[in-house]
Image (cartoon, rainbow, N blue to C red):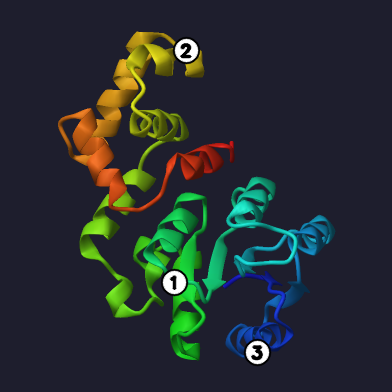
Amino acid sequence: MAEHILVVEDHPLYADALKAILRNAFPTASLAAAHSIATARAEIERRQPTLILLDLWLPDTHGLEGLIALRSSVPRVPIVVVSGFTERSVIDRTLLCGATAFISKSCGKDRLVAALVEAVAGNQEAREIALDPDLRDPDARVVSKRVRSLTRQQLRVLEMLCLGKLNKQIAHELEVGETTVKAHVGEVLRKLSVSSRTQAVVEVSKLDFGAMMFQESSSRD
């Protein structure tokens, strides 16, 4: 298990409870805490963690900005989001923006620990292991998994397909040739298991996220 765990949570009672669970479950791990993205970055400067637990809604960040900022700072460190907001759109956007896993704050201690172990081990099924069953939309999960298989450049192409842009326009924005764009579009369609650009847009609409999130997720490079 992780040697150094950073808990980023602004609610003192929940932060203390989370740290108590972690101390009991992983007695050899050291713990650090932060109540904002700014203090989290300061902690990371002092000592890079091997696991980060992150609450999405912090006082110095808006939406997924905090997750994107931390993912940019530590691209290889597992970041597990622990949140009370379990709307389908929030989950999909969180995972797309680089979270290793998404865990509901309403889950029990045992499920939380199991999810952390599985997520750090790289088990893809753990990405939503601690969610309530009714949040597991099978169709959306399949689409989400396919979207996550896209490269950063393919995500940018898909973003622009959703905006209705033509290959020539995409090529201009990406500063590449149209042949390259056609190749990217072909790979996007193949990975999404669809045969047309329209079908690709329809599939992505099941995830309820817009072009803004694609822009934010692609900015992680």
- The residue type indicated by label 1 comes to Thr
From the top left corner, tell me how far across and down residue 131 is, in percent: 38, 76
In the image, which disc is placed on residue 172?
2
Mark 3 near mark 2, Cβ–Cβ under 8 Å?
no
Residue in the foreground of this view, choosing between 211 and 187:
211
Closer to the chain start, of discs 3 and 2, is: 3
Q: Nearer the viewer, mark 1 or mark 3?
A: 1
The residue that appears at 29% across and 78% down in the rendered structure is 133
Q: Is 219 left or right of 202, judged from the image as shown? A: right
* Numbered-mark total: 3
Which residue does the numbered mark 1 point to in the structure image?
86
Q: CA distance from mark 3 to mark 2?
A: 51 Å
In the image, residue 28 sits, relative to residue 118, either above or below, namely below
- The residue type indicated by label 3 comes to Ala
The residue that appears at 65% across and 46% down in the rendered structure is 72
- The residue type indicated by label 2 comes to His
In the image, which disc is placed on residue 95?
none
The residue that appears at 45% across and 29% down in the rendered structure is 153
- Quadrant occupied by the C terminus: top right
In the image, residue 11 sits, relative to residue 221, either above or below, namely below
Closer to the chain start, of discs 1 and 3, is: 3
Q: Secondary structure at mark 1?
A: loop
Which residue does the numbered mark 3 point to in the structure image?
17
Crowd rating for badge 2 (residues with CA inside 10 Å; few <14, some 14–19, many 20+) = few
Q: Secondary structure at mark 2?
A: helix
